Amino acid sequence: MAICVGAPVGPVGCRPSSADPPRLVDTGLAAVGRGDHATARQVMRDLRAAGATDASLVVQAAILVAKGHPIPALDVLSQVASSAWLDPPRRLVAATACQQLGRHRDVESLLTPLVAANPDLVDAHRLLAVSFYDVGAVQEAVHHLRETARLAPDDPRPHRLLGLMHSDYELFAEAIPCYEESLRRNPHQPDREEILLELATCLIRQLRPADALDVLSTAAAGVRVDLARAECLLALGRRDEARRLVQSAVAAEPDNRAALVLEGSILLEDGDAEAAMIPLERAVAVDPHDYLATLSLARALAQLGREDEATATRARADEIRALRSTFAELHREAWERPHDSGVRLRLADTAARLGREDLETVWREAAAAVAPDAPASTNGTPARSQEAD
């Protein structure tokens, strides 16, 4: 979900006697949000000319964050004196810098008091939602996403992320209306094709293949869409149509695990276990930790009378299923315990055993972000990094 520090941030609280500095800060941050750094720099000059040096530093820091320089941005913000009217935008810019650095505790400490005082500050809710999501604190992320959706009724992104979160936890019935609402808000959003595929996948898992086919009928052609269509067609008993789609997918992507498993499954249903062995062995070679591929391979071996191999392969499938069950349970623990680094480390270890190096990295970073010794702000301004600029 994109975070835009340059979205208009309305200063809250007591303002100085002149309305110009707050208005200029709003203008400067909005310009940063549009990528119009020339206008933002002019705003900085105007603020300095008006004697509002601290306000100019906030806009300067926002530009640095937008350019991917969070550490220099935090150094600039450390020079800003405390000011009631300037505090909300300063905290938002600082929190966005901390988000880029993976400092979840800083994001939380900067923005939690801000939304307590200003519950309708949409940018703060948006940042908190993404930060909590990044560390697997799902309940908190859901709360702030729903607040973001309430405060930005035309924004499709909160419901898309809600859909992703629920589908990740295999809560498909809850994910479906989230995806549908995202598409209702903007049927032509940039991520439309991904959302259609994610929605269709949830419908398939809910045993609604006909509804999934309806969704996919509006999606652009591609291997992933064709495979989802094939899965629907198989569920509806339209095996020949499914076979053609799967064969085309395998021809286009010979090492596509999902395509290979579907090809093997169709051949098993045809009663041709010998032919099914070829794509299923390849699928297991592509991903030795895939449960469905391993289980299907065990079925093929059993049909061929290779009982010892079938028993060993089935045992491997059971091992993978147990690991996946542990992984799901640890996800639920992380959901309930947003500041527990230990459960996140166990998630990382389990991901490694499942061959998911990408998820292992995600959960190790999440564990570090919520660890008791992670850097955290105590006065609303993050500690200055010791890293070189």
Image (cartoon, rainbow, N blue to C red):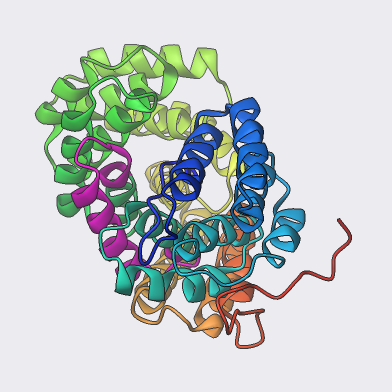
Secondary structure that dominates the magenta span: helix
Taking depth in this image into account, of 302 and 153 the one nearest to the observer is 153
The stretch drawn in magenta includes residue 356? no
Identify the residue shown where x is 56% and y is 36%: 32
Image quadrant of residue 226?
top left
Inspect the magenta stretch and tell me whether residue 138 lies in it.
yes
Quadrant where the N terminus lies? top left
166 shown above or below 366 = above
Segment tinted magenta in the rendering = 132-160
Q: Residue 90: x and y, percent?
A: 54, 60
Residue 160's place in the image compared with 270, above or below, is below
* Residue at 15 percent of width and 51 percent of height: 173
The C terminus: image quadrant:
bottom right
Q: Would residue 264 appear left or right of 57 to someone viewing this image?
A: left
Please identify the quarter of the rendering in which residue 146 is found: bottom left
Residue found 38% across the figure and 47% down from its top: 299
